[in-house]
Amino acid sequence: MRLHLLAAASALTLALAACASSGGLHPNGVPIDPASLKAAHHLGANDTAAWPDSDWWSALGDPQLDRLIREALADNPGLAVADARARAAQAAAGLADAARGPSVNAGASVSGARIPTTVMPADAGGGHFSVASYAYGSFKWGLDLWGGKRAAWEAALGTSRAAEVEARAARIELSGNVARAYAQLGYAFAQQDLAAGELKRAQQSQQLTAQRVTAGIDNRIVLKQAEAEVATDEQAVALADRAVDAARSALSVLLGKGPDRGDEIARPRVLTPPELAVPDNLPVELIGHRADLVAARWWAEAAGKDIKAAKTEFLPNISIGAMAGVIRLGGGNPFTLPARFYQLGPSLSLPIFDGGRLRANLSAKDAQYDLAVAQYNQTLVGAVNEVADDVSATQSLQRQLAAQQRAQAAARQAWDLALQRYQAGVGSYLEALSVRQQLLAADRGVAALQAQQVDRSIQLIQALGGGYQPQADVPAPSSSTFAHR
């Protein structure tokens, strides 16, 4: 007896020694501490920062834009893609949750067969057609001794939450793109006005030059130069008209409608860029205000749970199974006491040799975690620098616009003085038209800077999260997202 026990113990020891091991495998990803990304020098200190509201576009002051964004959020097909991905991730989480519990099945069957006497003697039923009927119920439950199934469910749940947040991020991006396209349409209309004004000035200059040539004051070279200027400005008008059509077409795409929808959009109002304050602890604050950062953290947490689930596959596991039913050969009622059968017993599984499958799987999970952390780090660094660049650009545009508006005011005063000189008979109208060209150039500069200012303010709103607020049913990732694994 002792020899049998010794042999069994030796065999178990050898088996355990030969079991698949996860030793030496671990992830290498290290997340960046948001507090280490210093940005106060570029952003300034604003303790009472006003983050964008969920309906931030209303601050731009155009009711038509409000309607267009609501229409886009309701009809854009790209959002349906994001929503479908979120639903698929939710279904996968449901499957992972269902795998944690027991399974119960039932079945029944009736079949008939003639068994030859070469297989079964005649006195045992061979050589006759007989009917076999049975019914059964089964129960199976794989115990989650090491929490692997729970970790797999938590990983799927994290993936589901990341997909939900990404669906919200798609809506935030869409609202920003609609606002930017709408602002571009307003700028295209302004360029159209300026091009028409420049063409009118060139045509008047051509007419006056033709009169001077007829009077012998100027030669035909000057007239041809004036005609070339008119042709150039006519091309600029056609280009401005095309810019309006292109902006309307871009809006039609974002709205999820055909090109005729763009023709129905009225000329936008002059948009007022909203004023936003940015806190000096921006990197820390951004984690809760940007949907892409929240999603990146969920992806990392899900990858970490996948590692835990993969590690439990190296460990032994116990499952419990049971089956009971009735079976009867031949006629008669199968639901009788002699026809009963049942089976009950636990089973133990222990991976010993699998050709390296488990180690390869765990190594892949480690790599996926490293990838998720790297993407989070990349998103965080990019977000902080994006906000800082937008703030710097916004401040620079304010200074540029103030200077350009002073130049515009001076050009307008010069135009007024030139008209007065012409009306008083002191100066020529050609001289006045030359000054008018300077005013149009100043107007063009102001329109361009105003458009850039609105566009940059929208980009800053998007960089600050676009009014994102975590939903109650999609909580923020836990503080242990990047705990050592």
Image (cartoon, rainbow, N blue to C red):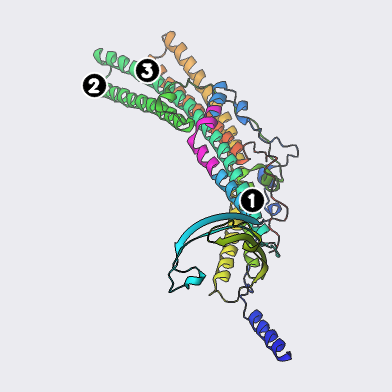
Q: Answer above or below: position of 315 versus 259.
A: below
Left/right placement of residue 381 relative to residue 417 reads right
Is any atom of residue 158 visible in this view?
no
The amino acid type, in three-letter code, at marker 3 is: Lys
Circle 3 sits on which residue? 200
The amino acid type, in three-letter code, at marker 2 is: Arg
Q: Which one is earlier in the sequence, the residue at label 2 or at label 3?
A: 3
Image point (64%, 50%), residue name: 157
Q: Which one is earlier in the sequence, the residue at label 3 or at label 1?
A: 1
Q: Is 48 contained in the magenta span?
A: no
* Quadrant of residue 474 within the rendered picture: top right
Q: Answer above or below: position of 9 versus 467.
A: below
Under circle 1, the secondary element is: helix
Compute the Cα span from label 2 to label 1.
80 Å
Left/right placement of residue 130 relative to residue 52 reads left
How many marks on residues? 3
Residue 157 shows which numbered tag? 1
Q: Residue 370: where, in percent of width, then height?
A: 60, 61
Q: Main secondary structure of the magenta part?
A: helix
